[in-house]
Image (cartoon, rainbow, N blue to C red):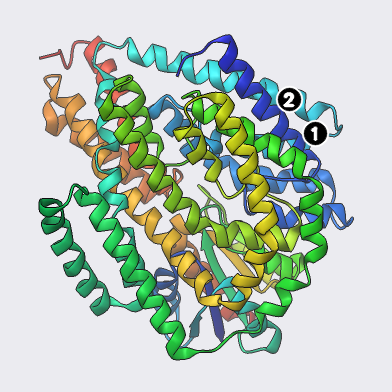
Amino acid sequence: MEVNALNIIIVMAACALTAYLSHMGMAVFHDGIRPVIPEYIEGRMHRTEMASIAFGLSVGFIASVGIGNALATNLLNPWLLFLATDIIGIASPKKWLAPILGGLYGALCLTGIGGINMVLTGMPVDLIGGMGEVGNYIVTGFAIFPIIAIVMQFGFKTGVITAVLVLIFRFAGPSFTPVSGDAWTMMVGVIALVVLCVMKDAKSGQKESAADSLNIFSERVARIKKNLPFLMASGALIAIACNAHIFAGSDVSMFDLSKAYAMGDTAEASALIRTVAANEFMRGLSFIPLIATTAITTGVYGVAGFTFVYVAGYLAPNPIVAAVFGAVIILAEVMLLGLIGKFLGNFPSMRDASDNIRSSMNTCVEFALLIGSVAACCTMGASTTAGAAGGFILGGIIYLINEMTGRKIMRMAIGPVAAIITGIILNLTYLIGLTPLV
Amino acid sequence: MRVAIGGMLKNEMQQAILKADPTVETIITTDMGAVPMLKSGQADYYFGACESGGGAAISILIGMIGYSKCCTVCKTGGKPNKAEIEKYVSEGKICFGMTVSNIDGTVPILMEVLKAHT
């Protein structure tokens, strides 16, 4: 992530606009703040009370996933930037103040994270190199999610049968096709999940009455459509930030993007970026029901929409194309919002599946991150006389203390955070001569 | 007591509730599916988990049941506060959101308060 004038302008513009969107109640990033905004607009809540809710819901996220992962990947992420601009926008007493404070916050994040990363890079015990291991299993781990979703929704037996089926394709598939094992794992798993859902729906054949209740929100959908120019601008700016290699959209993508960007302009890097984009797209699909339903019931959209603008940003050949795609994607999403709402109302099982898919994606990514982070701790330990086991014990102690004290740091962030702390401790023990380099 | 379950990690939520009180009737559904259940009295309470405890967990409930009936009992990185939960329950809140990271720490306290209330 390069800190230069152009990148600072991009980040400042994106943060200024998202803070403004949040102040005006047009769009927020946090799905939980969306339903609170009508309470304010319709006069049942004060701005200060709303600000304290936004702060309470997001501060843990910003501190653990936001800052921790930004340091681990040297890329900005939506939790760091947009959860904060949600709060800044809501808390700003004046309309003109929101974009100014948002822009300043963006500049602070880019220079701050870039600066801290530079300090970490210069340390005697190689911290940044070791952190490269954190993302080792993300792509493979993510590919397990359909199996876990099936276990959640259809039980142990169906889950194990699917797992066996998936594994057969995973090991046999690449021998007769150019498709990778991870792609086979994901593809067979997703097909199995869809088939099982359709079979269950066909069997039960019932439609719940939630359908009608979603249609009464057409007024709120109209409010989102009215704000389209601002929402499209936000989509364009976020796509540009992705395209400029300073921003990654989610935990699914950020570690591999960080690795790919470090490789430079090689064929291997662009293949990895394509895999990452495909995974980000899958993640985006699973979030549609959540974002669409909260948007339809509240009239408040997401600053990154259904998050497909990230994918456009990763894949676009240049920032101008990224901006155009970003804006057009948001336009299409908002135009389809009413239809999506109707569809979700008619098929409640889709929402059920979506809950399970999001849970299982998280479970898989958390697991892969934890294992990768342990590997990173071991690598850092092995470069000193502490040894791999020494790194393991440092990381292990940090992880278990967090477990036993009510998980102050979220599961998703504890792995990378533990690895960073392990690296810093090893550098300190190096400085006092306890663990010389080997 | 009948508890409708929505949000993330529903199985874990159900196990945590049944561990706290095996006599509770749990209904695994979705946030939207729980709305008619709560309105018709088919379910007494709603428990939901998401990353922050206030997002996917209860956002639809806030929109469709009303803000006055919903609350977050454990936020990300926080601990459930028994006195606060007692206050929420006595105010008539029936939809409870919590962070998915601390389902096992939150549900026993929430169940304790709800059992004392009924």
> Dividing the image into 4 quarters, which one contains the N terminus of chain A?
top left
Q: Position of residue B73 (x, y in %)?
A: 59, 61
Kindly identify the residue that appears in the image at 58 percent across and 25 percent down.
A320
Q: Are marks 1 and 2 on the same chain?
A: yes
Kindly identify the residue that appears in the image at 71 percent across and 72 percent down.
A214
- Local SS, label 2: helix
Q: Determine the image quadrant of residue B65.
A: bottom right
Q: Position of residue A348 (x, y in %)?
A: 56, 76
Q: CA distance from mark 1 to mark 2?
A: 8 Å
Kindly identify the residue that appears in the image at 54 percent across and 10 percent down.
A4
Q: Chain of mark 1?
A: A
Q: Determine the image quadrant of residue A82.
A: top right
Whether label 1 touches label 2, CB < 8 Å? yes
Q: Chain of mark 2?
A: A
Relative vertical location of residue A130 with respect to residue A90 in this rendering, above or below: above
Relative vertical location of residue A370 with respect to residue A157 in this rendering, above or below: above
Residue behind mark 2: A101
Residue type, mark 2 in image: Leu
The label number, if any, that marks residue A83 in the structure image: none
Q: Position of residue B33 (x, y in %)?
A: 59, 78
Relative vertical location of residue A137 with respect to residue A205 in this rendering, above or below: above
Residue B84 visible from this viewpoint: no
Residue behind mark 1: A92
Is A145 left or right of A62, judged from the image as shown?
A: left
Residue type, mark 1 in image: Ser
Q: Earlier in the sequence, mark 1 or mark 2?
A: 1
> Dividing the image into 4 quarters, which one contains the C terminus of chain A?
top left
Residue A258 visible from this viewpoint: yes
Kindly identify the residue that appears in the image at 66 percent across and 29 percent down.
A15
Is B47 left or right of A103, judged from the image as shown?
A: left
